[in-house]
Amino acid sequence: RRTEQEIPWTEGRDVWWHEITARQSTEHTPEAHEAEHPLFILYTSGTTGKPKGILHTSGGYLTQAGYTHHAVFDLKPATDVYWCTADIGWVTGHSYIVYGPLANGATQVIYEGTPDTPHQGRFWEIVQKYGVTILYTAPTAIRTFMKWGDDIPAKFDLSSLRVLGSVGEPINPEAWIWYREHIGGGTCPIVDTWWQTETGAIMISPLPGVTETKPGSAQRALPGIAATVVDDEANEVPNGSGGYLVLTEPWPSMLRTIWGDDQRYVDTYWSRFQGRYFAGDGAKKDEDGDIWLLGRVDDVMLVSGHNISTTEVESALVGHPSVAESAVVGATDVTTGQAIVAFVILRGGVTESPELVEELRAHVGRTLGPIAKPKQIKVVGELPKTRSGKIMRRLLRDIAEGREVGDTTTLAD
Ligand code: 7RM
């Protein structure tokens, strides 16, 4: 009734929320379960083919959801007002709207609307109104706010904020700095949290007030978690080198299997590197041993024999003052194997021109070296994204290679 819209109604099947909740008891006796009792199955789309039903169980999942929600956000349940803006159907909503905060007795904002209804200051109005102290959102949202302009958050009092979080994709250094300056008042620590549906909870992240942060790096495995970067032969790479992200010890909230397909579970996660969990992400360790995520391994481009990460080219483009967002894919190319094709959204007020496109190519060349220069840059108004804000590179590859676009049913737009 809340929406006051006409709804289809089947007598005997449908019930009114207000009627059914009004006649329930206010007492609830929790049901005890074995630690390994299944808690939920969450289907990940996967970039190709059949979705995987990721199985989580009760004890370990709650342990790590609770621990990380407390440690990574420095949660003080008596005084903090916590807000995670994720879609509740995404694993981030499960772990950091439902299980972690409820287990920790947090006071939280739960919001189901969009960031631009009724106006583009909606998030900041909510922060001001409820005195939000901890904000957990995604790079895609941050880049959208950048695109809308600094003047929008500037109209609101954001001084209650003390910790900012990011999740879902690598956060470009440019977006990180904007988040810190324009939302965090230049003082809030930012926690860039790496994890997956499969890991159930945060695995790699700075700790606020403990870690000296670096824009764009998730940095260190949390206490109790073991992660490293290995090469093709499973050798740990030295500092300053890149490879594949692996987890080397079990963790409480690890997935228990792929529902109904134990063999696929073994094949996908445990077969690439003996005795180690293969996350499917490329990563590098910098000179200090801090971890930088470089995007999905399937998305890494191979140009004239060089491995180039989509994330690094995207960050170089977003580092240009004319660019708000970008998505980069490798398209089949007869001479170089793959060629870099970039899709960019320009910042408000910037107009497209052949000179600008040339300037952007040169900018990437200066930042990353000539081999990383996109062969083609397409200026677009929107990028195809999932509901959790991840760019659907598969579709962009279809476009870059001149194919009909494939299945789009899980797209937000
Ligand atoms: C929580 C979530 C998992 C994939 C993962 C990465 C990417 C997530 C970060 C990140 C770089 C981050 N679960 N990813 N967080 N990449 N830095 N902080 O997103 O199952 O939907 O996706 O998301 O590629 O493997 S998920």
Image (cartoon, helix red, strand yellow):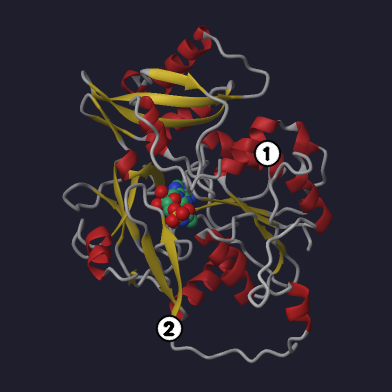
Q: Confirm or reject: label 2 Cβ below 8 Å from ligand 1.
A: no
- Disc 1/disc 2 C-alpha distance (Å): 44 Å
Q: Which of the two residues, 280 or 231, is positioned nearer the viewer here?
A: 280
Q: Is residue 364 left or right of residue 4?
A: left
Image quarter where the N terminus lies is bottom right
- Residue under pointer 2: 37
Q: Is residue 330 above or below residue 363?
A: below
Quadrant of res 279: bottom left
Label 1 or label 2, whichever lies nearer to me, is 2
Tell me what residue is drawn at x 39 percent, y 28 percent.
Answer: 399
Quadrant of res 100: bottom right
**Amino acid type, callout 1:** Glu
Give the x, y percent position of residue 379: 51, 21
Q: Is residue 65 left or right of residue 19?
A: left
Give the x, y percent position of residue 145: 66, 37
Give the x, y percent position of residue 120: 75, 39
**Amino acid type, callout 2:** His
Image quarter where the C terminus lies is top right
Quadrant of res 77: bottom right
- Residue under pointer 1: 181
Instruction: Assess disc 1: are there few (<14), some (14-19) or many (≥20) residues with their C-alpha within 10 Å of its C-alpha.
Output: some
Give the x, y percent position of residue 334: 21, 20
Q: Is residue 274 left or right of residue 44?
A: left
**Residue 114 visible in the displayed image:** yes
